Amino acid sequence: MSKKGERVMCRCKYPKYVNKEDISVVKDEKSERCYKATFSFNCEGNTILVISRAPKEISKNKCDSLYKRIIKYIDNNKDEFGKVKKLIIVNLFTIYEYSREDLYNECMTNRKAYIEGSKDVIYNDEIIASAIRESDYIIAGWGEPLEGLEEIYLRRVELILKSLRYELLRSVNKKYVYRVGEISKKGYPKHCLAWSYNDKVNDLFE
């Protein structure tokens, strides 16, 4: 049975170097929200973290276009990232985004704590902070605010940037924090789906 607002997932195949049997997903107990997705590439190498806007459905048998673009971008830029052990994807918001209206509608229905993932047992900001600590490369890919969510969006971005700076200062290992391509006119990094495979990475804080 389809969920409210659900669209058909793009039936893309995972690239061969992704271990489909080792895809890990952290969800809430009702599987209505996704906090983290991890894709394994190799037995050793760097860990890359991508911070996107909201999760898409994940299946071992088919790959959503969002995840495929992220995975292919990482693979196409091996010179920058080196050998990659795993890719972690977290999000500003935790509800599944089947359409652009989903975040707004859920915010009006369940209030912002629910879509931020700051309600119940699993706390999204703790998941994100842990993923930052675990990663060698961090890429901001959340894009511009959706209409009607500017205030909550800016608040989420500010909290993530604060967490990033805090974890960078206390880390004993060098971490690289990037955006892909140019920033938007409003000063936001490109959303993952807007990445071109030829886009270069740039320091997020420059």
Image: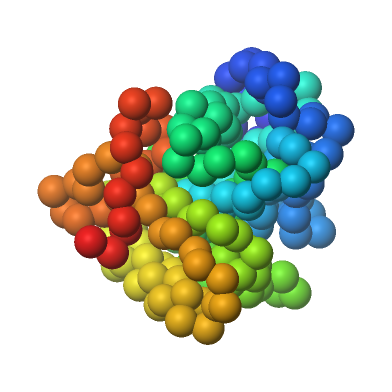
Q: Is residue 193 visible?
A: yes
The answer to whether residue 98 is above or below residue 162 is above
Quarter of the view holding residue 181: top left
Task: Give the total number of marks visible in the rendering.
Answer: 0
Residue 130: percent from the left, percent from the top?
Answer: 65, 70
In the rendered view of the protein, which quadrant contains the C terminus?
Answer: bottom left
Dividing the picture into quadrants, the one containing residue 149 is: bottom left
Describe residue 67's horizontal placement relative to residue 192 as left or right: right
Residue 117 vertical position relative to residue 38 in the rendered view, above or below:
below
Give whichever of 57, 88 is nearer the camera. Answer: 88
Q: Residue at x 79, y 31 (%)?
A: 19
| Quarter occupied by the N terminus | top right
Q: Residue at x 22, y 48 (%)?
A: 183
Vertical relation: 145 (above or below) 110: above
Q: Is residue 200 left or right of residue 111?
A: left
Point 65% across, 64% down: residue: 134
Model colouring: rainbow
Residue 78: x, y in percent? 52, 34
Quick check: can you spot residue 118? no
Whole-percent x and y of residue 34? 66, 52
The residue under the point 75% across, 38% down is: 42
Taking the view exactly as shown, the residue that stands out farthest to the left is: 185
Residue 147 in the image: state x and y as whole percent. 28, 50
Task: Report the front residue among 93 and 87.
Answer: 87
Camera-nearest residue between 206 and 121: 206
